Amino acid sequence: MEVRVLGALTLDGGRVTLARRDRAVMGALAVRLGASASVESLAAALWGDHRPASWTHVIAGCIMRLRRRIEPARIETTARGYRLLPEHLEVDAARFELLAARGSEQLEIGEPERAAHTFADALALWRGEPFVELLDWQPAQIASGRLDEMRLSVEELLLDAELQAGEVQGVAAAACARVAEAPLRERRWVILAVAQYRQGRQADALASVRRARRLLVAELGLEPCTELADLEAAILRQDPRLLSEHVLRIASPECPYFGAEPAGTGDAERYFGREQELAAALRTLDEHGMLLVAGPSGVGTSSFVRAGVGAQLLARGVEVAVVTPGEHPIDALRDVRLPVGSSLVIVDQCERAFAAEDPGELDEFFALLSRIALAGMLVVAIRADHLGSLARREGFAQTVRSHLLMLAPLDVARLRRVIEQPAEQAGLILEPGLVEILLRDATGRALPLLSRALREVWARREGRVLTVDGYRASGEIDAAVATTAEGVLAALSTDEARLLRDILLRLVEVTPDGTMLARRIERSRIAIDDAHARIVDRLVDVRLLTTDEEAVQLSHDGLARAWPRLGDWLADDVEGQRIMRHLGSTAAAWEAMGRPDSEIYRGSRLTSVRRWRAEVHPALSAVERAFLDASTAHETEGLVAVRTSLPDLQLLRRISR
């Protein structure tokens, strides 16, 4: 079944006719193709705020008739309304977006003739304003505006491709028409001026640039972009590059990569790699109104719920609030005021709620989340190692248990999209070989560290090109690790910095040949008190540590190598680290065996450990302290026994004489 929405809605080229209301409902379902549309939203599309008394029956009748007319395509009933399934449907808007992306790829790899053909095919799909039957419905307005902006960009890309293919005369004429249609789009003036210059009309080219600058200042009150200014200077100096096969072009001035911070709800266009999980998440949310998203630290859970789920719901016209709980988690929800039934609350980093000092406040927090889920839609994002803590909240856990989505680390193919797609959107070129090096270094690393490294490469770009040399000069991903670690340390107090040092030194071992190895240590030996636990959580949040309910380890084996400060700490106290590792493992074994006296320290080993403890004042776990106390007590008892027996020994010596 062919569905055309770029203009008046038609089915199978007009061979299937629909009544006005049926056409409007079909259009509303097509706006949310593959996603659930509530009955209320369909009513809003038909009547706005003035529904007739029988509106539910009218919509049910429309759905019944549409199901008969569009077979084998299907309209599925969901818990909240209806969903038009994309199977067996060919939608011209989706085809347009596919062709636009394909043409951009062809243009980027130096195939302008093919790109021009693809762009022309994409524009040929347009017959008028998208979703024209639904211009008063906000979701349709958003979808229509996005498609129309894409159309304007494709018109300019077509001119670019034709100019690169050498069709100077045709481009000059077409660019004049395009400028007249949208005179405030600077790119059209650039293409027109370059085409005129290549025709030998240098004066006309210069006049076009200056006319564009005057118009933009007069209409917008802003100076034009750098591209126009650069073009004017190039024309005046008769830059030979203007006669090359490429249009003078600069990349976007904005970095397309997120860096260490998670993507936000306004970053959907730059968010790639989770398309399959996003589709599954939206289906769950549409059907049940609730979603629990979990994944290991660094897998991109925050970006997924914000730039993925949240952005998609915003595009549908749903109001979205994103909150992150703290030590008083209930405070994060107090000011959330969203309309019932058409809103989404996203609770990001829910694991932070478990740091609440008052258990009663934690109970109130989860009770309020349950009420939010009943009133609207709820998405909860939590680190996977805290799922056990969530499971102990029996009431809430039972509600979300069947709506869990686990995010796994991205495979190589999807990591490639994370690297390549933002660069393509921003007009950047990745030097051959750079992507393969990044994929090699990013395997097993947290996504924010890859994104941070990419920002550093972008800062060292050469024109539009992100280079291997730029990546090397940035210090590679290891430098992103070191920068992150140094940033965490700088934000800590003196006492907290000492705790961080203690934690990291427990997790690294130096072999006799000087190799630094990461160790996996029981959580109880690392988070030995609340202060240490808070530092552990902070390091996990910035993806320097990985943890589960049992153990903690470095996220990056090369942290000690990449972060000079940690290397210095290790070099400063090699013997102390050897003592700490032996004490920790011996005390753990002593505890597991029931604390027998046969396993405690004695003699010179106990003396060296006690001297080290007095000099360094290390933070020890409860078991380690108990082990040393037992060792000391046993030695003291032995000395007392020896002293007590001394008179008897002296008497025996006299008798023997």
Image (cartoon, rainbow, N blue to C red):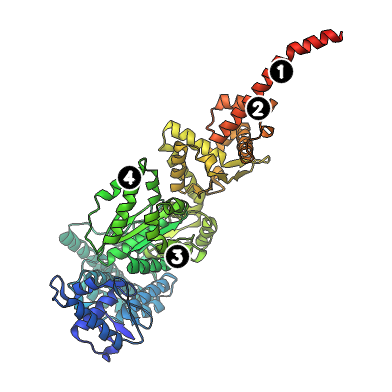
**Distance of mark 2 from mark 3, alpha carbons?**
57 Å
Please tell me whether mark 2 or mark 4 is closer to you in this view: 4
- Residue 302 in view (yes/no): no
Relative horizontal placement of residue 215, taking residue 556 as reference (left or right): left
Of labels 2 and 4, earlier in sequence is 4
The circle drawn on residue 417 is: 3
Of labels 3 and 1, earlier in sequence is 3
Above-or-below relation of 410 to 178: above
Q: Which residue is mark 4?
A: 361
- Residue 610 in view (yes/no): yes
Of labels 1 and 2, earlier in sequence is 2
Of labels 3 and 4, earlier in sequence is 4
**Distance of mark 3 from mark 1, alpha carbons?**
74 Å
Q: Which residue is mark 1?
A: 642
Of labels 4 and 1, earlier in sequence is 4
Residue 446 spot, x, y in % from top left: 48, 54
Q: Which residue is mark 2?
A: 606
**Distance of mark 2 from mark 4, alpha carbons?**
46 Å
